[in-house]
Image (spheres, rainbow, N blue to C red):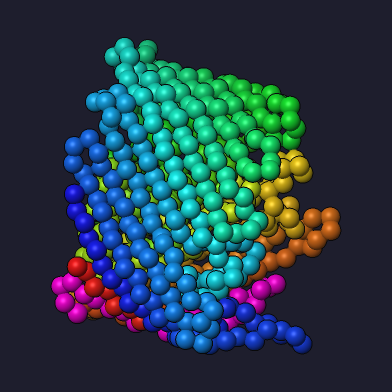
Amino acid sequence: MTFSPSLRLTETITDNVSLIGGTGSGTATSKSDYVTGIIPSMELSSRGGRAQGNLRASVANLFYANNSNLNTSYLTFNGMGSVEAIEKFAYVDVRGAESREVASALGVRPADQVTGRANQASVRSFGISPYLRSRFHNSGVAELRYDLNSSSATSGSFQNMQQQMWSGSLVDEAAFGQSGWSLAFSDNQVSQTGRRDLHLQSARLTLMSRVTPQLQLRVIGGGEGNNYNSSNTQQSTIVGAGFDWKPSAFGRVSATWEDRFFGPGYQMSGDYSTGPFVFNAKFSKDVTSTSQALSATSLTTAYDLLMGLLASRYPDPVARDQAVRTYLTNQGVSTDQQIGISQSVLNNGVFLDRRLQFGASYVGLRRTTFMFSGYRSERSSLVSQTAALGSEFSSATRVTDTSGSLMMSHRLTPITSVNADMTLIRTQADGTATTTSFTNKTRRVSTGMSTSFTRRSSGSLTYRHSRASGTTEYTENALLGSVIILF
């Protein structure tokens, strides 16, 4: 087990601490501020025996020189762990996180937790998943799992949510030599205060055949039922097909298409890694909820991006954590270097999400690293008016969120690096019968330098410029300095 405490001291000088502005009479004016941050942190990881996991936690204490009413302290943490309770049979996965997220995709999009706090909410999520896994015949695997996820936020429009799911599967890919089968079921329930419970049950039978050692084809049939639009359960069939292709030891592609109760649904993913290049992409259209969105990786930092990119290369999250930290240290990139924006969605109930997500890292030139991430999410309501999603869907029938971020870091000397990044964000809301459609755009660029003072201390200085247009308009210039001390 390893324990690594640290202390981060930050200073932010901004000319628009609340990210407000615009034109016309009565428009609020921007206010400058000097914000001091004192942020003790700790990292804990374990890889021994039957228990393994990692935890990152920090307490941010922010002090505003000109607006002391904004002074605040808050906890952030992100952890996951796994315990083998009974050898090769019973397991328990746990995960938990608390962070500050954008409360509404239709409002201002802050670059950090210091500015634009009016559109931020403290979000907490917790999940536990005990399961049993065993083998049958020569190649079959049986699993029975229970998932419990809960989430809460300080946003007034988001109600505490609890999601429970029972699932089971029997899989034997080589039952008939090069052909096999799988049988899977799930029973998913979403509960919220003051709203009726939402249920989705499904069962699938999949027949699969390995055409070549690299290619496997799948045919899917089954049924499902839900009560999203009525208190009575509505039944429908599932018909689909898919394939799994591994053209080389460095890449793989998987795709599934199904005819579902909401129309075509799909899950497609691909990843490739070799030498200096790592890439992955996911394209999906499926039912989801805030609890599920919070448990997914948010590409907000260089660390988060690489943790997602290297998932196939390092399935063990603890081993992946160590590999990512070593990689970033060798490239002179901080684990907290921003890359991309939060993808969390604070909506009640369940919704349909059509999402494209991708990321890439490339070390092609000597001492130079490029990281790129992007996503497009198109969300619409699946529930009846009596169980409305609230938040941004109170004024829109569909919300489309698109973002792309590029970061470059170049090591000048063994201890000093320069970096630059750009983020573009576009949010579009399709109006209802009583509201109009609108679009918000945000552009953010920053450049800076980081260096090591000693073996266990480092610092950085960054300039940032942000500009937004649409229903929320503002410009901001900020100078950010930080010092990190490792103990």
- Is the magenta region chiefly helix, strand or loop? strand
On the picture, is 119 further left or further right than 433? left
On the picture, is 385 further left or further right than 37? right
**Which picture quadrant has residue 87?**
top left
**Residue 373 visible in the shown view:** no
Q: Is residue 468 magenta?
A: yes
* Image spot of residue 190 (x, y percent): 59, 37
Q: Identify the residue at image location x=55%, y=74%.
A: 116
Q: Is residue 274 magenta?
A: no
**Which picture quadrant has residue 456?**
bottom left
Q: Identify the residue at image location x=41%, y=48%.
A: 96
* Image spot of residue 366 (x, y percent): 23, 70
Residue at the outermost left position = 455
- Total labels: the figure holds 0
Magenta extent = 453-480
**Residue 394 visible in the shown view:** yes
* Image spot of residue 260 (x, y percent): 64, 31
